[in-house]
Amino acid sequence: MRVLAGALLSILLGWLLTSTLGALGANPGLVTRITNKGLEYAARKGLLALEQELHGTTLPDFSGDFKIHGVGKGKYSFYSLEVHSCDLRGSTLRPLPGHGLSLSVSDSSIRLRGRWKVHKAFLKLQESFDLSVKGITISVDLQLGSEPSGRPTVTTSKCSGRIREVDVDISGGLRWMLNLFHNQIESKFRSMLESKICELIQKSVTSDLQPYLQTLPVTADINDFLSIDYSLVEAPRATAQMLDVLFKGEIFQSNHHSSVSLLAPVMHLPGEHNKMVYFAISDYVFNTASLVYHEAGYLSFSITNDMILPDSVFKLTTKSFRAFAPKKSTILSQRSESPRMQPRQAVAFNVPCRRLARLYPNMNLELQGAVASAPLLNFSSGNLSLAPLMEIEGFVLLPDSEREPVFRLSVATNVSITLNFNTTKISGSMKPEKVQVELKESKVGQFNMELLEAFVNYYLVNVLYPEINDKLAIGLPLPLLKRVQLYDLVVQIHKNFLFLGANVQYVRA
C-alpha cells in the first residue's frame, strides 16, 4: 500500500504540478491549466505504474490467538505476505474546488501469497496460503499549497479505505484447524489492511511525495546569462473542471536576480478543454528578458570592415563610402530648396562622401549600434512582432587608434517573430521586415539614404539577426519531469499572452 502514494501520487501529481509555469505580484507571468482530460490520462498511467509497483510488494506479518474446544489455546501467524497479482480497474483524479485534488480507487483487487504457522505447546505446524482481497475502495483528498520560497506543498487532508471481501485459502494437512476460525482470520485481515491503507498513504505523502515535489527547482537556466523564475505565486487553484498552477515566470540575469519594472498583465484564458494541458505564457515573460538584455548592454553591436562578407559590394572604408554620395537630382533639389545658401556652402553640403574620403583617405570605418530602449513584444491579430528603435554612430578609425565620430543614424525596424515548439521547450526566430534609416547628425554632409538603408538592411539580415536567432534557438525550457513529453501542440495568440495546448505522453524508461 505504501506505493499507492509513492507510485500513483508521485508520478501523477508530480508531473501535473511541475508541468506548469509562473508571475509578478497578484498576476502570474505563466499559467498551466490541467483539464479533466489530462487528469484522466494521469490516472490511467498511474494505475499501470501502480500495478507494476505492487507486484512483489511485501506486507507486514499478521498474527493472533485461537481457542478451539477440545484442542485448547494456541497461536497462529501469517508471514512472508507478498503481492502475487493485482487488478486495479477504476480510478479517478478530479479537481477539488478551493482545496486541491481528489483521488479515488474503486473495484480493485489484489492476490497475495504467504506462509502460515500454528504454535500450540510443543506442536508447530507451517504451510502456505493464498489471500484474495476484493472490492478495494480508497478515497484521498490532497491539499495543495506553496511555501514562501515558491515550492509546491501537498498534504493529506482526508482519507478512507474500505475492503469488501477477504478470502483466505489455507493449504496443508492441518488446515482444518485454522479453518475452524476462518471467519475470524478473514475479519482480522480486513481490519488490519483497512487500518493500514490511510496510515501508509499519509506516511508516503509525507516521506515520498512531498520531498519529490520539493525537488522542483524554483529557477531554471535558459542559457549562460539568463534564468527563469518558476516559483509559485500562490497555491494551485482548483475549480470543478480544471487545475490552474500559477508561476512568477520572470526572466532574470543568472548571477544577479533583481526585480524588473514591468507588471504581469491580467490574462483571460479561453474555456477550452480539448487538450490535456494548456500553457498561458504572457508577454511579461518575454519582455523581462528584453529588459535584462538591454540593462546589461547586450542589445548593442559593432560593425567593422572585417565583419563584412568578402563578396559584398559594401565595404566599411572611406573610399567605398564614395558610393553613398547623394544623387545629382537630390543635390539639385537641395540647392533649389535653399536659395539663400552660398555656392561654396552648397558644394560642401552635397559632396559628403568625397569630403569624407578626402579628410580621411584610405581609412576604415566602424559603426556602433544600440537599441534605444528595451523592445517590447507586441501581440496582435494572431501575430508577434517587435519594433526596436536603434541608433547607429559612424566612426573613422584613425591611424593612432583613436576613433573620430562623423555621423549618427536613427534606424526604425519592424521584426516579425516565429515561434517553434517541441516536446520540452519554446524557441523562436526573428525576421526583419521594413527598415527606415534617418540621418540625425553628420559632420560630412548628406548621404544617399536609399543606399544607406540597403547597407543597414544587408547587415541586419546577414549578420545581426542570424546571431540573434542562434541564441533564440536555444529556447525557453518548459519545466517538465523526466519522461514526460508534449505532442499535438496547437498555439493561439491572444491579447498579452500565448495559449499553447498539448496532449501529454509519459514515456517509460
Image: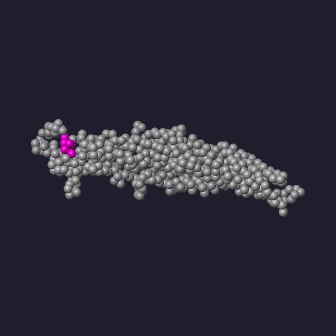
Residue 270 within the segment the image draws in magenta: no
**Residue 147 horizontal side relative to residue 57, left or right:** left
- Whether residue 127 is visible, yes or no, is yes
Residue at point 38% right, 49% down?
290
Residue 22 rendering spot, x and y as whole percentages: 48, 49
Residue at point 16% right, 38% down?
328
Residue 324 within the segment the image draws in magenta: yes
Residue furthest to the right in view is 70
Residue at point 70% right, 46% down?
109
Residue 158 rendering spot, x and y as whole percentages: 64, 51
Residue 28 rendering spot, x and y as whole percentages: 47, 48
Residue at point 22% right, 53% down?
397
Q: Which residues are magenta?
A: 320-326
| Towards the viewer: 98 or 317 | 317
Say above or below: 82 vs 275: below
**Residue 181 horizontal side relative to residue 136, left or right:** right
Residue 283 falls in image quadrant:
top left
Residue 88 rendering spot, x and y as whole percentages: 66, 45
